Image (tube, grey):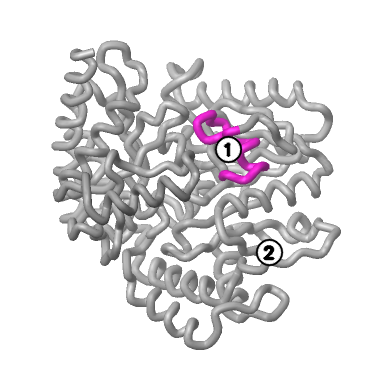
Amino acid sequence: MNDAKSGPHATLHARHQAVLPDWLAVYYQRPIEITHGEGRHVWDAEGNRYLDFFGGILTTMTAHALPEVTKAISEQAGRILHTSTLYLDRPMVDLAERVAALSGIPDARVFFTTSGTEANDTALLLATTYRRSNQILAMRNSYHGRSFSTVGITGNRGWSPTSLSPLQTLYVHGAVRTRGPFAGLSDGEFIKACVADLEDVLGQAHGNVAALIAEPIQGVGGFTSPPDGLFAAFREVLDRHGILWITDEVQTGWGRSGDHFWGWQAHDGSGPPDILTFAKGIGNGMSIGGVVARAEVMNCLGANSISTFGGSPITMAAGLANLNHLVEHDLQGNSRRVGGLLIERLRAACAGLDGVREVRGRGLMIGIELVDPGTGEPSPEGASAVLEAAREGGLLIGKGGGHNTSVLRIAPPLSLTVAEAEEGAEILEAALKTGLETTRSGRSAS
C-alpha cells in the first residue's frame, strides 16, 4: 500500500480537521479518501484497491456501482429530482407498497425519512404519542442514532454524548449473551432470567411505558445478539402492559443475517413488532430511512406533518431498483451460504490466537471480539492495530463493541462471492496475527 504521509491525501486530511468537528471520527492513522468502487471493491485516491468488508457501515448492501441502481438514479434525475411529500410521488408509493408487504406487520403504513436516526426518532414520537408516555425501555449496549432523542436511549456511553433527554429510559438486560450476570446460563435459563429482569424494571416505571426499542443484532455494540426467541418472550410481558415493541432493523434488515429477511423473525413466536425502522442497505448508498407501523399507531399524530426530503423521487427510484435486485438474485440466500462459510473460516483462523475471545455472527454480519490475553479485558488497542493491518493488506473492515470498541465488524455487500470471502479471510487472518503481535510488543515496551 502507498504511504499517505504527505501530498494531496495529507492536505485533504488537514482541510478536514480545519473545518469539520473534532468529534467526527475517521478511520486509520492516515485516513484514506475513497474515490470509486465496483462490486465488492473500492479504490482510494492513491490508486490502492481494497476488498470492502464494511460497505460504508453496512450501507452498500448489494454492490458498488450496481448497474440497475445507477441506471434508475440517472433516469429519474433526467425527469425530476425533488418534489416533497406535498405532491403524489409514484416511486414512493411503489416502494412503500413493497416494504409494507415485506414487513410482516398487518395493515402497515410506511413513512420515509433520510436516515436511520430520523427513522428511530419518528418511531419514538409515534410510540410516546400513542401511549401518552415518555418512558422507553431500551437494551444495554445499544445504539439507535445521533439525534437528541436517540442518544437518550442509546445504552452505550461511547456514542451517547449527553445524559440530557426528553425521554426517561430504563435499560433491560439481554442483548449481550456472553458477558454479564447471566452469561453462564443456558439459552433457556438466560431468556427466563432476562424476562425476570424486564418484569423487575417495569416495577420501577411510573405508570405507562411507551415502548421497548431493540436491535435484533446490535450493530455498533459489536454484532451481539440474544438467543432466538428472547424478544418473543419479552413480547408476552409487553402485551400484558400494552407496551409497544419497536424493532430497529437499520443494520439487520433486508436479509443481511441470512436466516431471516428481518432480524425480528428470529423472535416471532409472539407475532410481528408494532413498529419497524429501517435504513442503510435499502438505499445502497442513497439516503433512505423509514418507519413501518400498524395504521392505528402510525396515524395517531394529531398535527400536520410532511417530509421535505424523505421519500424523494430519486432515492425511491434507487431503493426500488436495489430491492428488486436483492430479491431477484436471492442475496439473502447468498448471505446465508457465503456468510456461513466465512464465519467458519474465520473461526478456524482465530482458533489458535489467544487475543481473540469470540467469533460470532449470522449471515454477513460477523464480529471478532479481541481481548488482552493476560487479563481477558477488552482490547481496543488490538482492534485498532488489526484494522490498520487489514487496510495495509487491502481489506476494509469496521470496529465496534460497546464503549470499549474492541470488536472487529465484518459486513460485506450481500453479493460477496466465495472466492472473495476466502480472499478476505486470508487477509484478515494475517492482519490479526500482525495486529495482535504489534499490540503485545507495544504493551511489553511500556
Q: Residue at x 47, y 56 (%)?
A: 280
Q: Which residues make up the magenta segment?
A: 145-161
Residue 77: x and y in percent read: 48, 82
Q: Residue at x 66, y 42 (%)?
A: 148
Given this view, does label 2 or label 1 mark the residue nearer the observer?
Answer: 2
The residue under label 1 is 231
Image quarter in which the C terminus is found:
top left
Compared with 282, 73 (above or below) is below
Compared with 285, 24 (above or below) is above
Compared with 221, 203 (above or below) is above
The residue under label 2 is 109
Residue most extreme to the bottom? 79
Residue 331: x and y in percent read: 35, 62
Magenta span contains residue 229: no
Residue 153: x and y in percent read: 63, 36
316 with respect to 240 (left or right): left
Amino acid identity at mark 2: Arg
Identify which residue, 103 or 167, lies in the foreground.
167
